[in-house]
Image: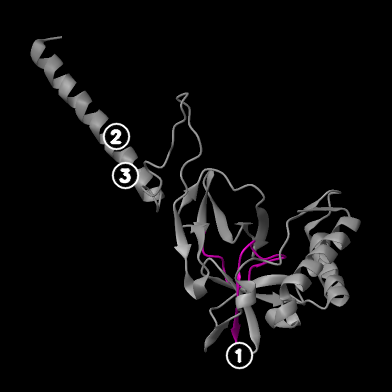
Amino acid sequence: MSTKRKSLFSRMAGAVVVAVAFSAGTAHAAGNPYPDRNRGNERHDDRGGHSQPRVESRIDNRYSHNRSYPSRGYVAPILPTGYRAVRYRGSPYYYSRGAWYRPYGPRFVVVAPPIGIGVGFLPPYYTRVWFGGTPYYYADDTYYMWRPDRREYVVTERPTGDARVDDSATQGSDEIFVYPKNGQSEDLQATDRYECHSWAVNKTGFDPTRPAGNVDESDIVSKRADYRRAEAACLEARGYSVK
């Protein structure tokens, strides 16, 4: 092959490589609505390996909630420990400590939950907010309402009107962590949680779904503790590990 022909061939091959690389990069960016959200977030351990990426988070300070949650649009490589899988209108969602995730290829993206989706328990920390005579449970820019017919807390539209924060519910949650030891189905878990909640309310007089627990202000701390112990005892008797 002549020197001139070799030179022409080399230029053509280089142009093809550049075009392919550009096309691949463009396709990757087009297929990823958050192409740069996690870039630079990976940490390295002292042995040169890879550890978990840093979680991009924000502080939710509405109603003095003041809790940290992963930012909407953050793409996580794996789901958090203790997540709950929820299907809504045929689509999978994953719920963990107030944040909601959806599958995103092999990873999971933090999203706003759809109106109408529900779970059987509130996040570890929430703020109870009253609109008129109706209590709502707020966390991570999301409002929940207890639906007795579904026996779960359902995501609702943001209520209208003046809000009143129930200060007795902002320091912590009346929620406990419950793990089925005998392979109980999600439907059975929801039934057991509701029935044990009702039993604990009847036994102690403290109802976390009512203003100030429906007890005198001076009794809130002690009655809340009584309620938690009663609910835990009921659940443990039904084959759950309670923490």
Closer to viewer: mark 1 or mark 2: 1
Q: Which residue is mark 2?
A: 21
Crowd rating for badge 3 (residues with CA inside 10 Å; few <14, some 14–19, many 20+): few
Q: Disc 3 residue type? A: Thr
The N terminus appears in which quarter of the rendering? top left
Percent from the top left, x then y, of residue 96? 62, 56
For numbered disc 1, what is the local secondary structure? loop
Asked if the stretch drawn in magenta spans residue 118, the answer is yes
> Residue 132 — which label?
1
Query: Which range of residues does the magenta coloring cover?
Result: 111-132
Q: Which quadrant of the view contains residue 192?
A: bottom right
Q: Amino acid at mark 2?
A: Ala
Marks 1/2 in contact by CB < 8 Å: the verdict is: no
Camera sees residue 237: yes
Q: Residues within 10 Å of mark 1 (few under 14, many from 20)?
A: few
Q: Secondary structure at mark 3?
A: helix
Position of residue 218 relative to residue 32, above or below, is: below
First in sequence: mark 1 or mark 2? Answer: 2
The answer to which of 149 and 206 lies nearer the viewer is 206
Tell me how far mark 1 sits from mark 2, CA to CA.
Answer: 59 Å
As shown in the figure, which amino acid type bears the numbered disc 1? Gly
**Residue of label 3:** 26
Is 116 within the magenta? yes
